[in-house]
Image (cartoon, rainbow, N blue to C red):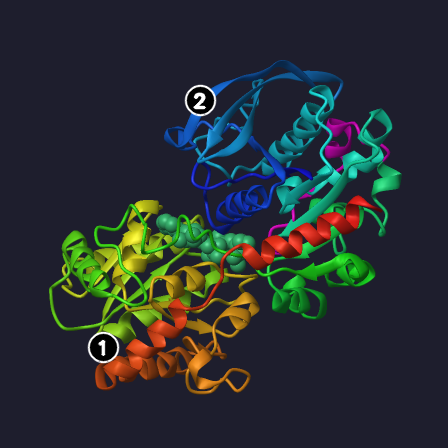
Amino acid sequence: MYIVQVASECAPVIKAGGLGDVVYGLSRELENRGHTVELILPKYDCMRYDHIWGLHDAYRDLLVPWYDGAIRCQVDCGWVHGRLCFFIEPNSDDYFFNRGCYYGCSDDPMRFAFFSKAALEFLLKSNKRPDVIHCHDWQTGLIPVMLFEMYKYHGMEHQRVCYTIHNFKHQGIAGADILQATGLNNATYYFQDERLKDNFNPFALNYMKGGIVFSNYVTTVSPNHAWEAHYTDMGCGLGHTLHLHQHKFSGVLNGIDYDIWNPEIDRYIPHPYTAENREGKVKNKQALRQRLLLQDTDKPIICYIGRLDQQKGVHLVHHGIYYALQQGAQFVLLGAATEPGIHSWFWHEKQHLNNHPDVHLELGFNEELSHLIYAGADMIVVPSHYEPCGLTQMIGLKYGTVPIVRGVGGLVNTVFDRDYDESHPPDARNGYVFFQTDHTAIESAIDRALELWQHHPQAFAQLVTQGMDYDYSWNHPGESYVAIYDRIRHQ
Ligand SMILES: Nc1ncnc2c1ncn2[C@@H]1O[C@H](COP(=O)(O)OP(=O)(O)O[C@H]2O[C@H](CO)[C@@H](O)[C@H](O)[C@H]2O)[C@@H](O)[C@H]1O
């Protein structure tokens, strides 16, 4: 099969969070299975060019119709750790992707509508006719809309779209001008309940809703979150739309790329280790302390790695830091906030705790450091408010870092409480789960983990082994996506 992934991120060249990991990991798995995969991405000025090999011109003078005229684009192509990627660079005064950031601009809906249009135009003009176009998140929600309303009539009638939602919170909301810009026009047609009209704001168009309505198949990134999005407020207003399209909607649990996230071969950690021999993990813990200037004591290290966002339960992360210190543990946090309020909150905490020998808060994005933290910490907290899948708990498991998670979304599908999970026998449990959002809930889960670490080291080691034995590779999800592609290809 010939599959084209269109997304706003692909790790490690463009990574703001888990979307990048998934786009890269799934693409590699599909190629390993013998399929042809290409990726279409924006050419951001701030992406990691050091991760692209052989960047060269692929298509010059791609004229992308936009409003009444056209924007001239250049498409470059190169390999990102073996994946063939096409990067779209528009030449216009809008500087869509030359902003020094991936997201966070007031015209984001316009920027990514343009990217979606350009991606389709590139496929059309370069005569690429994939069996499946796999689109991700709101940024590419307009692709199936434009494909089936416009491009289908210009030679792309056989292409099918699989649309994956990684985060229902961000849906891409725009006004009627987007219809003129993209050439979809016909406002009366698109401002219909069964098309793009936002379910709550009658004057707005919703890209993600468009993605759900027009795609041949829709997934989100875990079975439990598929249920939550359909039946609870976690669908952020799209529950009814999902209900109407339930025949083509399901949850596929993400995988982890074990070529990148694997303590046996991880090039960012000084001491490799395996589930059977974890001496390296002890040394990585020392290396982590040295790197972050933490005191060398006989204490467990609890970590948090992730975006600092309401989604991630920041108030519980914050409480977790102080509670861990109070209970005699060390704490390491690596996170970046886009919301100014959260950023300044954690920045002040960092100043406040700066001279504390048992805690380090690293505010910013640092891929290399994240590997050392996964390898050196004993436990990882993921107290999310909601979590479509969650990768950090799965990476933690692979690195023998016991997850302490809130029982929501994909966390429920991947972490099984050592003491209370009744659906798994004791030798298949791998972490700690709490459900409420108050302080007591996370405290009691941390207490249980620390108690085991401090007083029953052998049982803790056994729990680590059980976690490391789990297979959250792309193997199973890869199979599921191929089945979905096969199903829609023959429609
Ligand atoms: N400051 C930092 N420095 C270095 N690395 C950092 C970092 N902050 C985060 N990361 C890395 O980014 C990834 C984050 O994964 P998450 O599952 O938390 O994704 P996120 O919430 O962004 O995305 C959404 O998409 C993913 C993928 O579908 C879903 O798992 C998730 O639930 C959903 O919210 C991990 O690889 C982590 O190590």
- Left/right placement of residue 7 relative to residue 337 reads right
Determine whether label 2 and label 1 are within 8 Å by CB.
no
Q: Is mark 2 within 8 Å of ligand 1?
A: no
**Three-letter code for the amino acid on which mark 2 is drawn:** Gly
**Three-letter code for the amino acid on which mark 1 is drawn:** Gln
Q: Quadrant of residue 226?
A: bottom right
Residue 73: image x %, image y %? 61, 18
Q: Nearer the viewer, mark 2 or mark 1?
A: 2
Q: Is residue 341 visible?
A: no
First reached walking from the N terminus: tag 2 or tag 1: 2
| Circle 2: element type | strand
Tell me which segment is drawn in magenta.
Answer: 167-186
Task: Count the marks.
Answer: 2
Q: Residues within 10 Å of mark 1 (few under 14, many from 20)?
A: few
| Circle 1: element type | helix
Residue placed most toward the observer, 154 or 437: 154
In the current view of this chain or complex, which residue is farthest to the left? Answer: 296
Q: Residues within 10 Å of mark 2 (few under 14, many from 20)?
A: few
The quarter of the image holding the N terminus is: top right
Residue 312: image x %, image y %? 46, 62
Q: Most prominent secondary structure in the magenta stretch?
A: loop
Q: Which residue is mark 1?
A: 326
Q: Quadrant of residue 298?
A: bottom left
The answer to whether residue 165 is above or below residue 421 is above
The answer to whether residue 239 is above or below residue 19 is below
Q: Which residue is mark 2?
A: 54
In the current view of this chain or complex, which residue is farthest to the top? Answer: 61
Residue 302: image x %, image y %? 29, 68
Magenta residue check for 182:
yes
Q: Is residue 70 visible?
A: yes
- Label 2, label 1: how many angstroms apart (C-alpha)? 52 Å
